[in-house]
Amino acid sequence: MVPHLTTALTGPLLELEKRFLDHATEIERWMRTRWQDHTPPFYASTDLRNSGFKLAPVDLNLFPGGFNNLDDVFLPLCVQAAQAAIERICPDARSVLLIPENHTRNQFYLQNVAKLVSVLKLTGLNVRIGSLLPDLAAPTTLELDNGATLTLEPLERRGGRIGVAGFDSCAVLLNNDLSGGVPAILQGLDDQWVIPPVHAGWHTRRKSVHAAAYDRVARDFADVIGIDPWRINPEFGVCGQVNFQERTGEECLAAQVDTLLTRIRAKYKEYGIDETPFVVVKADAGTYGMGIMMVKDASEVLGLNRRQRNKMAVVKEGLQVAEVIIQEGVHTFETIDGAVAEPVVYMMDHYVVGGFYRVHTERGRDENLNAPGMHFRPLAFATCCSLPDACQGPDAPPNRFYAYGVVARLGLLAAALELEETAPLADEIAA
């Protein structure tokens, strides 16, 4: 069964979805040619927003932590895609070392790690979990609420390689976004594959760099199917000198917000959209939905109160926010059981392997749903979202999900470009 999907509009998005369906052959051919030239990330997840007149990615995570939210029917897809990725990176691999976040009490995240371990084992790999916890002195087994167990082991450095006691692996798989920087034990690993590469971590990665790469991808793709790239691409701006605690950089931020809102209003007028434009101000580096503010007028970022400044000033690992991206806000018109929802699509290698809805009963269609109080609804696609059905309408589940899969893969391609183009700088930083 596919969860009931409600959209408030029945016109423009159906037209966009039909465009995807009518050009599916060209789309898949275009995708194949791009992946011949670029290496996809091992895995990624992207948050999509469907406004009825626009379908666009608003965030992409290179260290996805929600595999536990995928329906079990996706497991074969995950295994096949993981096998393709491993064969590409290390064809003769027999083992992999998984390095997770330093969570020991977050049951949802730990269940994600357990699901990821099960996928890797089903590819034929031996898997051990090496922990970066500083006080972990011996193997420690964690009992999970769903009945699974995880054994965390202390990491050991051996020259240019890393492992755990009695275990040496071809590759190291990071499920840790390195927000606090690259630990010394992970620096200079010149004799092992580290995936994703350490420069994919938030210590160097910037959302604005990804947005710029996605802008190029979206424009190229839009030419292929003959659409305005704005229909799949959130506009953005950057303000690189902000200190919310000291209230510096507010003028820069307000100016960027005003410029972006002006461009969005012009687009709304062009398409006859009767909605209130908004932008999302968020930390240019970081995750977990931290450091985010929705803004409908430039005056809102001037003279923030203490609570607002504290919310924006610090993100994961206590890192201070000095750079922000101002991104066009995309309304979501999707609901699950009356609650506002947005799809999250998971990918491994260059394949879509599943997805789920992020649902929030206390948020509106122009608000951030990645916030306390959210829950997840697994999607069990009646068919894989890479298999559209031309005999059904554009909004039939396999076709709507095909559109989601296309846009998610555009974000994945942008991430591949981003990693390629930032690698030299990251190598210098890690040296």
Image: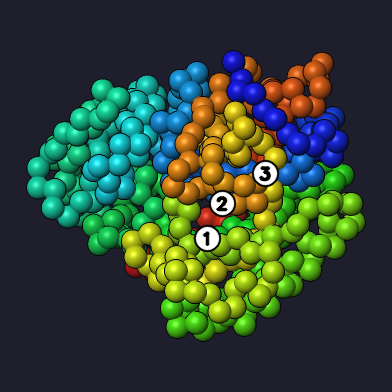
At a point 62% along the width and 82% down the height, the residue shown is 251
Ranked by sequence position, the earlier of labels 2 and 3 is: 3
* Quarter assignment of residue 186: bottom left
Quadrant in which the C terminus appears: bottom left
Q: Amino acid at mark 3?
A: Thr
At a point 41% along the width and 62% down the height, the residue shown is 315
Q: Amino acid at mark 1?
A: Ile
In three-dimensional space, the C-alpha distance between marks 2 and 1, rounded to whole angstroms, equals 8 Å
At a point 60% along the width and 52% down the height, the residue shown is 367
Ranked by sequence position, the earlier of labels 2 and 1 is: 1
Question: Which residue in the protein does label 2 denote?
Answer: 368
Q: Amino acid at mark 2?
A: Asn
Label 1 Cα crowd, 10 Å radius (few <14 / some 14-19 / many 20+): many
At a point 74% along the width and 22% down the height, the residue shown is 396
Question: Which residue in the protein does label 1 denote?
Answer: 292
Q: Secondary structure at mark 1?
A: strand
Furthest-left residue in this view: 137
Q: How was this image coloured?
A: rainbow
Percent of width and height locating residue 129: 25, 38
Percent of width and height locating residue 121: 33, 25
